[in-house]
Amino acid sequence: MSPDSPALPLDAAPDPEWLALVREQVRNLRYGVVQLVVHDGRVTQIERTEKVRLASDRPDRPGR
């Protein structure tokens, strides 16, 4: 944003397309990471890494 451009309240500006995509990725993620890649101040890529957690079927052993 340049110093001479007026600031808009966050709720007045329409959401950019990438923001809707990020919300969708986060909403559908149980465990993992969503990363944004930015070039020249613009979001150019959204990366999602999902982890699958398995239930432990045995108690932890002491000393480990």
Image (tube, rainbow, N blue to C red):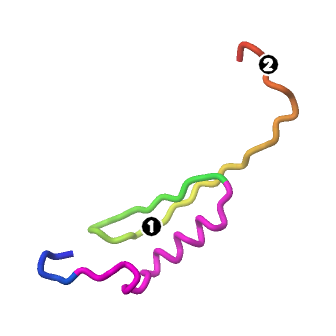
Spatial CA distance of label 1 from label 2 is 43 Å
Q: Nearer the viewer, residue 56 or 46?
A: 56
The quarter holding residue 42 reads bottom left
Q: Position of residue 18 (x, y in %)?
A: 46, 75
> Within 10 angstroms of label 1, few (less than 14), some, or many (20 or more) residues?
few
Q: From the viewer's perspective, is the residue at label 1 or at label 2 nearer?
A: 2
Residue 63: say if magenta: no
Residue 27: say if magenta: yes
Q: Position of residue 26 (x, y in %)?
A: 59, 64
Residue 26 horizontal side relative to residue 60, left or right: left
**Quadrant in which the N terminus is drawn:** bottom left
**Quadrant in which the C terminus is drawn:** top right
Q: Say whether marks 1 and 2 touch (CB < 8 Å).
A: no
> Which mark is on residue 61?
2
> SS of the residue at dot 2?
loop
> SS of the residue at dot 1?
strand
The quarter holding residue 37 reads bottom left
Dot 1 corresponds to which residue?
A: 45
**Residue at (87%, 34%) from the top-left corner?**
57
**Residue at (79%, 24%) from the top-left corner?**
60
First in sequence: mark 1 vs mark 2: 1
Q: Position of residue 12 (x, y in %)?
A: 37, 86
**Residue at (16%, 76%) from the top-left corner?**
2
The quarter holding residue 24 reads bottom right
- Point out the stretch of residues depicted in magenta: 7-30
Amino acid type, label 2: Arg
User: Is residue 50 depicted above or below 55 in this figure?
Assistant: below
Which residue in the rendered view is the most extreme toward the right? 57
User: Is residue 34 depicted above or below 24 in this figure?
Assistant: above
Q: Position of residue 59 (x, y in %)?
A: 84, 26
